[in-house]
Amino acid sequence: MIPYGFITGNTYREKWSDDPDRVLYITGLFDGLMMSSMFGGDGSLIMSFKACLNGMNNKQVTVIVDKYLAAHPELWHQDMQVLAVDAIKEICPSYREADAAYWNEQAAKASAAGTRRR
């Protein structure tokens, strides 16, 4: 079984202490996120995410993620891909709003489906 995430924030910090390793991880992670619509990811949410990163290079994004981790040691045990996305949410209000709207919509759909089943 493939786990939800392969590494945690602790693994990222401890095993990949060199900047090039972290940059490669973040590059692969974010490249994958940008292609998630091919696997059913919400296209408008992905576009909002891309807009937040527009003009940034992989080193800049890595520094943003590293700063987020440094500010939140209480989260290091969590899955790294979630922490990286949360780092972008923190610096990008438009993505944070799009993400909240997406999850509110999903909750409304689930609630409506539950109401119909009764």
Image (cartoon, rainbow, N blue to C red):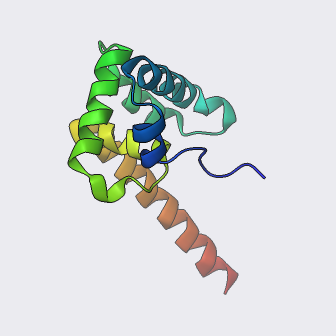
Q: Who is closer to the viewer here, 17 or 1?
A: 17
Which picture quadrant has residue 113?
Answer: bottom right
Can I make out residue 93 in this image? no
The residue sitting at 26% across, 37% down in the picture is 94
| Number of marks in the rendered image | 0
**118 versus 95 height, above or below:** below
Which residue is rendered at x = 67% and y = 52% of the image? 3
**Is residue 30 placed above or below 117 in the rendered structure?**
above
Q: Looking at the image, which residue is at 38% across and 31% down?
A: 48
| Residue 44 relative to residue 40: left or right | left
**Residue furthest toward the right?**
1
Q: Nearer the viewer, residue 40 or 67?
A: 67
Q: Position of residue 10 (x, y in %)?
A: 43, 48
Q: Is residue 43 visible?
A: yes
Q: Quadrant of the C terminus?
A: bottom right
In the picture provided, is 60 more to the left or to the right than 76? left
Q: Which residue appears at 66% of the width and 29% of the height?
A: 38
